Amino acid sequence: MKLDKVIAERNDKIIYRDGDKVIKVFDANKAKSDVLNEALNQARVEESGLKIPKIFDVTRLDDGRWAIVMDLIDGKTIAQLMDENPDKSDKYLNTFVDLQIKMHEKKVPLLNKLKDKMTRKISETDFSATVRYELNVRLESMPKHTKLCHGDYNPSNVIITENGDAYIIDWAHATQGNASADVARTYLLFRLAKKEDMAEKYLKLFCKKSDTARQYVLKWLPIVAASQSVKGKPEEKEFLSKWVDVVEYE
């Protein structure tokens, strides 16, 4: 493996290109269980028939860092395309939403359950016992589904190839559960990026295309905001705290 061409850097990983392969190299302190779980998630989603990069290998480098090797998807992310062609942002947003709806139609029964993950995340927050109780009551009241949920679905995680094929990448947070929780998280990610207009346009478009009530999606916002707060980003704390509330957001 050649690790000399960096194509992306994240907080806990560096992504390299080596010929027709991508090598995602994790920091030395990244837990082995997290790396193996991400690879397993991706391998299971592969079997659904959805267009995603195929896992080629999971290995440990000489310096002890773990790496996942997968097929290279050559193209540009929807985020890049929107930045480069702002006049076509509506077109790309339609593609983004259509792909998410297609993803939610898939079943991957061996993935962890979204509800279990949300329950765990709520318990890890530093909110008061009263707020955690209310969040858990709300979570329990939500309909239980088994749809494929990405967990971090945003325009940077969709690559469009030159021939127009769309691939979803980064399956570390994949679960099976209620699709509206996945939509609420995407909406929240737009808001955290201070793209309020895009967030509203996205939610309106998704609800129209999927025939989903806006109020139904928004019921998930306090729950997904609480789970996001566990990441401990100081710049997000105040914003998320406002969303983690027992009031209705309709």
Image: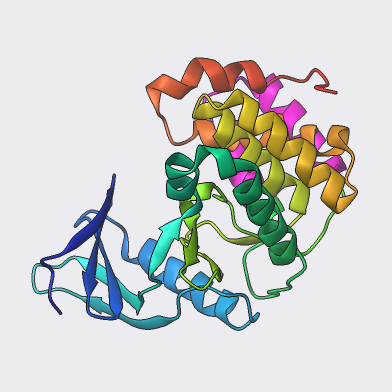
Q: In which quarter of the image is the N terminus?
A: bottom left
Q: Nearer the viewer, residue 20 or 185?
A: 20
Name the residue located 44 percent from the left edge and 40 percent from the top edge.
Answer: 83
Q: Which residue is drawn at 56% across and 71% down?
A: 165
Q: In this view, does 69 lie above or below 229?
A: below
Magenta residue check for 110? no
Identify the image quadrant of the C terminus.
top right
Main secondary structure type of the part rendered in magenta: helix
Image coords of residue 170 (percent x, y): 46, 60
Residue closest to the eye, 219 or 205 = 205
Q: Is residue 98 left or right of 198 when viewed as pictured?
A: right
Q: Where is residue 61 in the image (x, y as percent from the top left)?
A: 15, 73
Q: Return the x and y of residue 86 as percentages of the image width and height.
A: 52, 38
Residue 147: which quarter of the image? bottom right
Task: Inspect this view and state whether residue 110 appears.
Answer: yes
Q: Which residue is drawn at 69% across and 51% down?
A: 94
Is residue 129 one of those drawn in magenta? yes
On screen, residue 17 above or below 144: below
Q: Quadrant of residue 225?
A: top right
Q: Is residue 56 left or right of residue 180?
A: left
Q: How are the colours assigned in the image?
A: rainbow
Residues rendered magenta in the picture: 116-142
Question: Across the whole image, how many numbered discs are drawn on residues?
Answer: 0
Q: Position of residue 2 (x, y in %)?
A: 12, 75
Q: Does 247 appear above or below 88?
A: above
The reply to whether residue 124 is in sight is no
| Residue located farthest toward the front when viewing the structure as drawn | 87
Front residue (pair 41, 33):
41
203 left or right, relative to 208: left
